[in-house]
Each structure stands twice: as C-alpha cells, then as structure tokens.
Amino acid sequence: MNTNTPHSGSKSARPSGFSLTDWMPKIVLAPTMVIAIVCIYGYMIWTAVLSFTNSRMLPSYKFVGWEQYERLFNNDRWMVALTNLGIFGSLFILICLFLGVMLAIFLDQKIRAEGVIRTIYLYPMAISFIVTGTAWKWLLNPTNGIQKLMIDMGFVNFKFDWLINPHMVVYCLVIAAVWQASGFVMALFLAGLRGVDGDLIKAAHLDGASTFTTYRRIILPSLKPVFFSALVILAHIAIKSFDLVQALTNGGPGYASDLPANFMYTYTFSRSQIGMGSASAMVMLGCILAILVPYLYSELRGERSEK
Amino acid sequence: MKKIALGLTAVALSLAATTSQAGQVEVLHWWTSGGEAAAIDVLKQEMKEQGDTWKDFAVAGGGGESAMTVLKSRAIAGNPPSAAQIKGPTIQEWGDLGFLENIDDVAKAGHWDQLLPPVVSKIMKYDGHYVAVPVNVHRVNWLWANPEVFRKAGASIPTTWDQFFVAADKIKKAGYIPLAHGGQAWQDATLFEAIALSEGTDFYKAAFVDLKDDALKGPKMVDALTKFKKMRQYVDPGFSGRDWNVATSMVINGKAAMQIMGDWAKGEFTAAGKRPGIDYVCLPAPGTSGQFTFNIDSLAMFKVSGKDTQKAQRDLARLVMEPKFQEVFNLKKGSIPVRLGMPRDKFDACADSSMDAFNAASATGDLVPSMAHGMAVNSMIQGAMFDVITNFFNSDSMTPKQAADKLARSVKAASM
C-alpha cells in the first residue's frame, strides 16, 4: 500500500492545495491509532477505574478506594497464584535463556544439517500453548504418560507424578513452557551470533583465547541487546500465561497451579467479581511495567548517548 | 465495495424482516451438545406451531461462562434476549439489577404454584413474583455402579458410607479402581456435597443454604470432610483434571466400580448401549436415599418491548411448563420433569426412581439445592467453597478441622 501512495498522492494532491503525500501516512495510520488508543489504553484505564469500585456481576461506579486490593491480598488463592508466578516466571526465563544460548552456540559451530536441526528446535514455537499443554498433560499423567512407560519398561518403582502433586505441579508448567519457548530464544541468539564480526573472533584466537573464553568474554557480552529482548519477551509470556495452565492443569490439583491470569479470568467472569478481577489485572500490569520501564529507559538512554 | 453494499442490503433486509414478523423470541442458552440440542429443538418446533419465531442464540463452551459474558454485554447495551438460561441464585442477582420480567399471569393461568414444590418455585421468583420458568430437574446425589466389578471383587453395592469403605477396600484389593473421579473443582464439590448430605438435611441446609457459621465449622462438617478425604485413596493417580464423562466411561468399561455424579451420567451409559439394572445400577449416593439434591435448569425472562415480542415470551414460558414439552425434553436430556404428577411410562427405571424421590423429598422437606451446581449460593460463595474443598482434597497437610475453619472463614469473606 505504501508503495503507491507517493505516486497517486502527488497527482491528486496539488489541485486541492495541501500535500496529500504528507498526510497519507497519517491518514493510513489513523484507524490503527484510534483502535490502539481506545481498545488498549482506553480499556486499561477502564479496568483501573473498575478496580476501585465495588463492581460485581456488572460494572458499577460506587467507589470503595483500595478495598478490592485489600481483599485481593487477603485471598489465599491470589497469594498462591503470585507465588506460582514467581517460581514459574524465574525458572522459565532462566532455563529458557540458558538452553537457548547453549543451543545457539552449539548450532553456531558450523555443523552439518544445521537448517534441519534449527527448524526442529524452533518448531514448538509454532504450536499454540493449548496444544503444548494438552500434549504434556498426557505425557505427565502418571497413569498413561512417562511414568507408565517407565513402569512398563521394567522400572517398577519409577515415580513421576508431579502433575498431581500440589507442591510440584508448578514445575510441570515450567517443563512445558521451556519446551515451547527455548527454541525461540535459540533463534534470537543465533541471529545475534551471526551478526558478531568474524574479525573480532579471529583476533581473539590470534591472541590465544580459547573458544570458551572467546564466547564468555567477547561474543556473549556483545549480545547484550539480544539478551534484553529475549528477557522482555519471555517475561511477558510468563506473566500473561493463561492458556498453558488452562490446558495442562486447569489450575489443579485444587488451585495449586493457578497463575494470576487464570485468577483474573475466574474472578471476573465466573465468579462475578469484576472489581476484584480488575484489581488483579492491575497488579499484573504493574508486574509487566516493572520489567518494561527499566528496559525502555535503558534503551532510550542508549539511543540518546549514541547521538 | 460491491460486497459491502450487498452485505448492507442483506442486513437492512433482515432488519426489515425481523420487525415485520409477529412475535419473535430470542433465547440465549448453551444446550449445544447432541442430546441437549435435540431436546431444545422440541421447544423450537412448538413455538413455531404457536405462530411465533424462535431466534436461536446458542453460545457454547465453558459450562455457560461464555454465554453469561455475552448476556452481560447484551444487557448493558440495553438489548437483552427475551429469555436466557440462568439458574439458581443468579436469577436473584439479575432481579436485583431490574432486568427481569414479571410472568405471574402465565404462572397463575398454568397453576405453577400447585405444580412446583415450594423450594423450586422460590428459586423461580424474585421478590415474590415469577421471573423464570424451570425446564428440568437433575438429581445430583446418584451413585453409578458396575455390578460386574462388584461381583468379581466379592463386594456388595453400598448404601451407607461405612459399607462404601468396606466395599472400596475389597475392590481395590481385587485390582480395580473403587471410585471413578475427575479432579475438577465442581466434581470434588459434587462428591463432597453427597457426603455432607448424608450428615442430615438440616445440617446440609444450615451449612450450604443458610451459611450458618457453626454448621460450617461444626463437628458434622469435620466428619464429612474426614470421609471426603478418605475418598482420596480410592481414586486412581490419573484423576487430576479428568472430565466427568471420561470417569463415567471407566465405570462403563469395567475399569472402575463406582462414580458419584448427577443423572446426566446416564446419557453416557445409554450411548454405550448399557441397560439400567443389568449392566449398570443407579442408586442414591450412600446414606442419602430419601434425600434429593436438585440441579434445575431454568429460563429467566428479560424485560422486552413490543407487544408481539412480549406475547411470544409468554408463549414460551407457558409451553416450557406444559406436560408435552416437559416429557419430550427430559426424555432426551436424561433428567426428570419439574412438574409433579406427570405420566411416566416412557421414562426408564433410573428416571422413575428419581421421580419417586423427587415427590417424596418435596413432601418431607428433604429436597435441597445443589451447592456444587450453583443452586444454593451465588457464584462468589460457591467459588470460595470450591477453593477450600478442592484444596483440602489435594492437600497432604491440611486437617479436616483446619479445612472446616477455613471454609467458614472463606464463606464469610466472600459474602461481605
């Protein structure tokens, strides 16, 4: 679309007195902007407003101050969800980054059939979390998954029942999510590694640095921006995780594997507690901002100092 | 551009069509699975015979959650459907918001007060006026058993919880799963409320209907919770997150001996070609033989404008309560009619005994609303109860006493 605008624009613009060429991009972008402002920021503000009201089944505008937040943080289930987010989020991000970097480095060793292997590792990302969750639900189910396989193979005492153990179930979420996302992190880092100046590596080798040192001291530090992008993407995947829990455990056993997004959905839509649900949504937004703001700040500062 | 114009014309035409038609009734429901859809088709047909048009507004999924979300947005926009599938205390919530239509005239002409047990009609009324019409009655406290498994294990089918534990031990020893169960909050609650009901109707009502603090944390609740926890050892390790119909199929194919589930489980047995009394047995849940936990689907009537639309709405309310619809619908759905004193030659043995129990329980006062199915308390309190019950069932450290205290506390917090 953009490619024709200068041509067609300049033809019709002159007679009307102002340059359509200048206006075209703005006009084309305007609907998107309006939708973004109303549907993202507008509703964000609405949710914020609702979180200070006593809304139950339908939105109401009787303001009750911080009461919904007080109730929220007195709610056992919410605290379980928040704790789970802490465990799930940190393990998921760390393991994904570690595996992603390692896979990228191994693939970068100019091995044979790299394209095939890369595709295999990247493929889980093409699957939706619902499919991942369902497949892992079967694998982790003690009566028909890995545990049964091992028992059938003769390891009679093999036990792997994390899925039904309230203390361990959150690690099942980590396993499934890592399986899905580490290939994507690998792709990010692989692209980064390919961008590293080859002369730099040659120079390091000439100076007698080992491959390990070269990676640790020279290549990986130069990938800082990639590292940050991966971190931000993984963090928001972790915070908004909803479908994975829904498909893999449905919050169970009990509500031991609830994450904040599932809590928000349950309270807002099935328990007619729009006020409390909105409050939990605002806390989630706060978590995302806590990660995004420092990142954006450092990015913007970086740009300024480059100028 | 042409396409848009065509689309607009089509919309305009359909708008014109709707306004010119006499008496349209729009019904929001989530009866979308095979048997249910066939059941609701009966109503569509009958409405057509009355000269009214039926506008189907089926929203599938999420046990009605998605439908409720759609209903809320339609109601806020000032354009609610004529009727919506709403049940239990949720009817009161909609009544509080002033959305529901008084249909006392239809109820009076149809003698609903005489036909419905008072516990049921109370749910259908807001502020003393009928605003909803009951469609069917499900009995929740059923025990489904596979007699073949019992025979092989040398156990007899239990009628009390003590017998249940004896039988379950034998079945477990014989290598079968004693209780087919799915680890979903509502299934945990279904099992638990059956146990709680065996502690007595008065206790059940005090705890789950009147939410009395001393009943919620009292000795009977602790006893019920202790028995409930004992069930944990009779389910197989793969129960987590299992759907109810998968659990039912375990009873059908002889992997498990029993399931505590409402009478919708019968549909699974029937679909598998099993005969009641021979291939499977339906009994009241242990210790609850004279009692009846009901789960009633109903259609709540919304305030609509236009004479024709209102007439159609009243036709709908009237037809739903008529014997013909009650019979055909419930035969298809596996539930029983809500009207007392219907001919029952077409119903099977399980439905027949369910109807006996419904009549008897409504006379003795042992007819109670199901907490697990949203008939007793509003969704917030129900959710709070679910959280405690399901968490206790899966916890390895919480004692029954702690759980009872927590139940009382959560209910109090949720009712604020």
Image: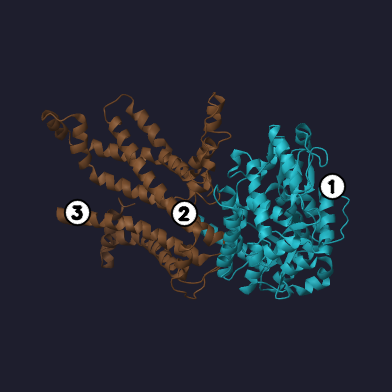
Where is residue B171, by image quadrant? top right
Chain B on-screen colour: cyan
Is residue A144 toward the left or the right of residue A97 in the image?
Answer: right
Per the rendering, the mark at residue B349 is: 1
Secondary structure at badge 1 equals helix
Task: Note whether residue A186 is visible.
Answer: no
Task: Note whether residue B137 is visible.
Answer: yes
Secondary structure at badge 2 equals helix
Estimate the spatial distance between the alpha carbons at disc 3 and disc 2, rounded to whole Å.
Answer: 36 Å
Q: Position of residue B404 (x, y in %)?
A: 61, 58
Image: A94 above or below B201: above
Q: Position of residue A250 (x, y in %)?
A: 54, 48
Q: Position of residue B139 (x, y in %)?
A: 75, 54
Amino acid type, mark 2: Ala
Is residue B43 toward the left or the right of residue A278 in the image?
Answer: right
Query: Crowdedness of circle 1 by 10 Å Cα count: few (<14), some, many (20+)?
Result: some
Chain A on-screen colour: brown
Which residue is disc 2 drawn over? Answer: A81
Amino acid type, mark 1: Ala
Closest to the camera, between mark 3 and mark 2, is 2
